[in-house]
Amino acid sequence: MKVTLSVIKADVGSLAGHHMVHPQQIEEASKELQKSKDNGLLIDFYVTGVGDDLQLIMTHTQGVDNPKIHGLAWDVFTKVTENVSKKLKLYAAGQDLLSTAFSGNLKGMGPGVAEGEIEERPSEPIVIFMADKTEPGAWNLPLYKIFADPFNTAGLVIDQSLHGGFTFRVMDVMEGKMIDLHTPEESYDLLALIGTPGRYIIQSIYRRSDGLLAAVASTTRLSLIAGRYVGKDDPVLFVRAQHGLPAVGEILEGFAMPHLVAGWMRGSHHGPLMPVGLKNAKCTRFDGPPRVVALGFQLCEGKLIGPADLFDDPAFDLSRLIANQIADFMRRHGPFMPARLGPEEMEYTTLPIILKKLESRFKPIP
């Protein structure tokens, strides 16, 4: 059975600053999606919140980039904004909605989208990752570890079905181009690109032996769309597991080290990506630190069986401890790099206004 999985998120307002989605927002979104399930547009859905982002997880048979599905998500986000966020005076109501009217596709309109059409296998485990206070390039390191690093994924060595490697589709979000690179033989070329996560972003991964879709990530960068800082891009990702793909445990292992990512306070700092359960997906210290949630589902004829809250586990306590230690260390730098992002990232913040104000006071060096 062919099923399309659409994971679409947006910041449409939050409780107590950039802290968390309000329960009434989830309730309103669920009510709207239930109507589309009842009329047959959706097979199933699940609504949640991670940090200040409202997350819509939907299954259907409409295919990728379908105007009905994207229009539905847009309508849900706008109704939640009008009916809940603005009425409750939640902070930054409708922040990620960069247009006043839907144009047929969500690309370039603000919400983040990870979407793929798959042929459902006899057993179809899927892990959906949702991050807050960071950007799409945050997936680069864990995705490389999951699908290309045998020190992370034992199956790359001991499972013959993984020996053929994977194809990584990488987006150059500055130039609007893409390239397919094949592991293991092009691993060094791949690393040369994705080590610059602000520009080169892994968009999707395919099994080389048969082209099976293994993972899809959102790649939208709000600053590039709006030309200014409008909040970090808070990406989403889904990864298929088992049966000739990395096991669920190997997929989660890619996040065991809380690596440094761009975002955090005002989208202008580096911080550790902390794996947390849904109950702890609330950003506090310095509006963070950046965090990631992993929800595990089984697809059954398009129905979402679950979720399992996969990071809600003491096995990740040490990762969280290390993340807090890193957060403390980075905060001690104050406004200095590398805690603060470099100038190429800061150009989308208010820093250019400050530089403009001081421009006339700069004098030639004698």
Image: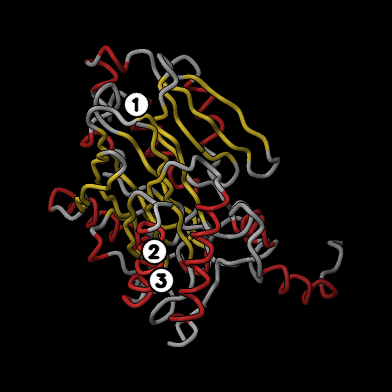
Element at badge 2? helix
Q: CA distance from mark 3 to mark 2?
A: 35 Å
Question: Hey, what amino acid is under mark 1?
Answer: Asp
Mark closer to the observer (3, 2): 2
Residue shown at 27%/40% (left/top)?
299
Element at badge 3? loop
| Percent x, y of residue 162 | 31, 18
Q: CA distance from mark 3 to mark 1?
A: 32 Å
Task: Left or right? Give the position of 106 relative to 304.
Answer: right
Tag 1 residue: 149
| Percent x, y of residue 357 | 78, 77
Label 1 Cα crowd, 10 Å radius (few <14 / some 14-19 / many 20+): some
Tag 2 residue: 35
Query: Pointers 2 and 1 in contact (CB under 8 A)?
Result: no
Tag 3 residue: 287
Question: Hey, what amino acid is under mark 3?
Answer: Asp
Going from N to C along the chain, the mark reached first, 3 or 2, is 2
Q: In the image, which disc is placed on residue 64?
A: none
Query: Pointers 3 and 2 in contact (CB under 8 A)?
Result: no
* Depth check, front residue: 121 or 99: 121
Residue shown at 36%/28% (left/top)?
147
Label 3 Cα crowd, 10 Å radius (few <14 / some 14-19 / many 20+): some
Q: Residue furthest front?
A: 39
Element at badge 1? loop
Going from N to C along the chain, the mark reached first, 3 or 1, is 1
* Depth check, front residue: 24 or 343: 24
- Quarter of the figure with the N terminus: top left
Query: Pointers 3 and 1 in contact (CB under 8 A)?
Result: no
